[in-house]
Image (cartoon, rainbow, N blue to C red):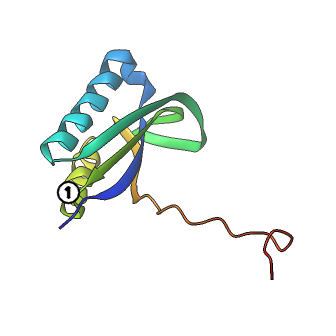
């Protein structure tokens, strides 16, 4: 089985502060390494306004989140474990999404560029 290209956006509760946010990012990065992921890139988008308020825990609704984008190559079998790790961080990780990155497609020439 070969590794595939994935990316994951994680929205972290900004009330955790710099140290708490850093810990969540480090934990996910370490899990990626344990699952033999390669070419790991971490892109910090920082605190951004959410499209709608998200319940962090009972009685606490947030309108901002700290966004982090991970890009990595991993075995498909690792994805369920990565999602489970994020799911149990309820209240700390507000939302997450892991998707396969699409392969780059050759550009389609416009009608004026093609000889035909």
Residue 2 x, y percent position in the rendering:
22, 63
Quick one: which residue is furthest to the right in this view?
112
Q: Nearer the viewer, residue 31 or 73?
A: 73
Q: What element carries label 1?
A: helix
Q: Where is residue 17 in the image (x, y as percent from the top left)?
A: 39, 18
Q: Is residue 15 left or right of residue 20?
A: right
Report whether 73 appears left or right of 69.
left
* Nearer the observer, 98 or 65: 98
Q: Measured from the top left, where is residue 104 in percent x and y?
A: 52, 61
Residue 51 seen in the current view? yes
Q: Judge left or right: residue 38 versus residue 108.
A: left
Instruction: Residue at 45%, 33% (x, y): give it.
Output: 43
Count of numbered marks: 1
For this rendering, which residue is in front, 102 or 116? 116
Q: Mark 1 points at which residue?
A: 78
Q: Where is residue 62 in the image (x, y as percent from the top left)?
A: 51, 34
Furthest residue to the left? 34
The quadrant where residue 80 appears: bottom left
Name the quadrant of the C terminus. Answer: bottom right
């Amino acid at each position: 089985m070969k590794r595939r290209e994935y990316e994951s956006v994680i929205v972290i509760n900004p009330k955790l502060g710099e140290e708490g946010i850093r810990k969540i990012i480090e934990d996910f990065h370490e899990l990626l390494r344990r699952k033999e992921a390669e070419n790991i890139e971490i892109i910090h988008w920082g605190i951004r306004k959410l499209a709608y308020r998200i319940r962090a825990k009972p009685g606490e609704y947030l309108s901002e989140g700290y966004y982090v984008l991970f890009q990595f190559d991993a075995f498909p079998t690792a994805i369920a474990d990565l999602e489970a790790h994020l799911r149990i961080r309820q209240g700390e990780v507000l939302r997450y999404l892991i998707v396969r990155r699409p392969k780059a497609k050759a550009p389609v020439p416009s009608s004026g560029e093609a000889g035909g």
